[in-house]
Amino acid sequence: MTTGRREITSAEFAEVIHEFQHTAFRLEQQPAYVVKEEADILAAFLRGEPRPAGTVPVLRQWFDQIADHVRQGKRIERVRIQRTPPTDYQRFERAMDPENIAAGEVLHYLTWERAHEIDLLPAAGPDDWWLLDSSKLVIMHFDGHGNRVGDELVTDPTAVAQACEWRDLAVHHSVLAETSTRPST
């Protein structure tokens, strides 16, 4: 008997995350992320010398993949749950919004306090996750310092249905990023 949950490798994560047919949604809630490829542009941003995220090859690849998905008629959306005031890393993320949005991603913001008021947190768990086509859930586990320590693929229908409810709750109570446009339905 299967539980509909299994750990996946980084390579499997990269495949699964781009196999969706229609929609991909991410709930993002870490106050900071440790991404070695971003270290230089994050440091430049913190020094007051921002550089375009697209100058980082891994980020340029992400933006290109997003744009390709959107050209195929797919929707990529995320809600970022952020502290008040935002952490330095969260301010850095916001500075990258125009590039994410130009690629076609729809970004929303929700404060940590509001997420608790609407009972999204702590119910949705401490980790980030992707909901793909409302049929698969990919949980990204973190260590509390922003380091990703593992990924889990969940296909259990009950867990996926719960994630769909959390997605709807998060989107309903969030605010679109300043340069986002609501996707047509």
Image (spheres, rainbow, N blue to C red):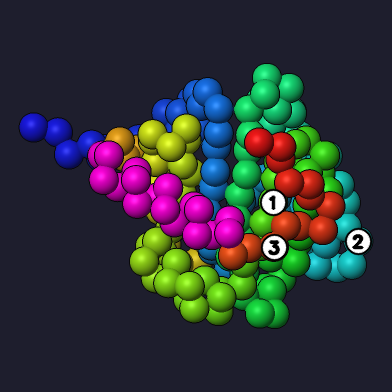
The residue depicted at 79 percent of the width and 49 percent of the height is: 180
- Residue drawn at x 45%, y 28% is 16
Task: Answer with left or right where residue 4 lies relative to residue 72.
Answer: left
In the rendered image, the residue lying farthest to the front is 185
How much space separates mark 2 and mark 3, taking CA atoms?
A: 28 Å
Question: Viewed as shown, does residue 49 lie left or right of 170?
Answer: right
Quarter residue 58 falls in: top right
Q: Check disc 2 and give the amino acid type.
A: Glu
Q: Nearer the viewer, mark 2 or mark 1?
A: 1
Residue positioned 38% across, 34% down in the render: 135
Q: Is residue 5 above or below residue 165?
A: above
Q: Observer-nearest residue: 36 or 139?
A: 139
**Kind of residue sitting beneath label 1:** Leu
Q: Going 71% across and 40% down the picture, which residue do you hit?
A: 183
Q: Is residue 56 above or below residue 14?
A: below
Q: Earlier in the sequence, mark 2 or mark 1?
A: 2
> SS for tag 3?
strand
One can see residue 41 in this view? no
Dot 2: element: loop
- Mark whose residue sits in front, 2 or 3: 3
Residue on which the image places disc 2: 49
Residue 88: where, in percent of width, then height?
71, 71
